[in-house]
Image (cartoon, rainbow, N blue to C red):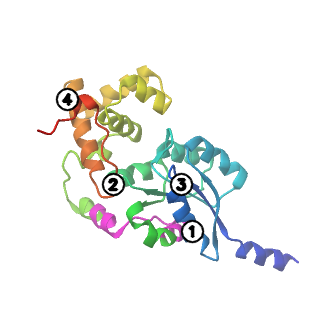
Amino acid sequence: MAQRNQTQGQDRRKRILLVDDHAIVRYGIAQLINREPDLEVCGEEEDAARGFSQIARLKPDLVVVDISLKNSSGLELMRNIKAQHAGLPVLVVSAHDETVYAEIAFRAGALGYLMKSEAADKIVGAVRRVLSGNIYVSDALADRMLRQQVGGRPDMQESLPQRLSSRELEVFQLIGEWKGTSEIARQLHLSVKTIEYYREQIKQKLALQSAAELTQCATTWVQRELAAPGSPGPAVPASQKTVSQ
């Protein structure tokens, strides 16, 4: 009987929780995972709070999460998982540029980062690698990271993940999306004073002299990051849009 129970434990399919705010993306990933005899999607959610609450109930072996979730942040979800479910691996599957966000995701607790544009071909391999306790990144990103370690010197825009903390970079991105201090505070569930503190910290670290310089720098960075293939266009307020002649 003991041997039978041990065999059943070994044969149990690994359970995967999907947290992504796009139903069609969840459906596609679930179809690919559920084809595998040793893997299954045990649940799907579209926001960080509900995704986190499902962990205790579903007891997944892996969480697959996007950076941007419905009214919330995948990075915050990862931090909470790292703090309260230590040892639960997380794989990020996102349209956000891996050259910018992979390092931030790893800081927050992820073990792997996969671009959505490659998910159809590589999701199963990435899931298996992270489940085994290893780090997953694309070949291109691994090569880029190695070259930087050897002696490459990235420019200021590319080095932002190294200059700013994960929270500072979140605030910086939202500034670049033309969101005001109060709106950022609401979105990140922080006080206005805390956001003002982060703004000052960002200005100091990036040697920016004014709020206008901060906004310009953040906007440039956001537009550059969102211009990557598979990413949505930047959210620019109507007052800043140019009218075609």
Which of the numbered marks, if any, corresponds to residue 97? 2
Magenta residues: mostly which secondary structure?
helix
SS category of the residue bearing label 3: helix
Amino acid type for the residue under numbered disc 3 = Ala
C-alpha gap between disc 2 and disc 3: 21 Å
- Which is nearer the eye, 27 or 5? 27
**Which span is picked out in magenta?**
126-145
**Is residue 93 shown above or below 212?**
below
Left/right of residue 69 with respect to residue 51 in the rendered view: left
The residue at the far left in this view is 245
Which residue corresponds to mark 3?
23
Q: Residues within 10 Å of mark 1 (few under 14, many from 20)?
A: few
Which of the numbered marks, if any, corresponds to residue 31? 1
**Is residue 54 shown above or below 17?**
above
Mark closer to the chain start, 4 or 2: 2
Q: Which mark's residue is nearer the viewer, 2 or 1? A: 1
Residue occupying image coordinates x 21% and y 26%: 212
Residue occupying image coordinates x 40% and y 41%: 166
C-alpha gap between disc 1 and disc 4: 46 Å
C-alpha gap between disc 4 and disc 2: 24 Å
C-alpha gap between disc 3 and disc 1: 12 Å
Mark closer to the chain start, 2 or 1: 1
Which of the numbered marks, if any, corresponds to residue 213? 4
C-alpha gap between disc 2 and disc 1: 24 Å
- Which is nearer the eye, 70 or 170? 70
Q: Residues within 10 Å of mark 2 (few under 14, many from 20)?
A: some
Quadrant position of the N terminus in the picture: bottom right
Residue occupying image coordinates x 43% and y 51%: 105
Amino acid type for the residue under numbered disc 2 = Asp
SS category of the residue bearing label 1: helix
Q: Which mark's residue is nearer the viewer, 1 or 4? A: 1
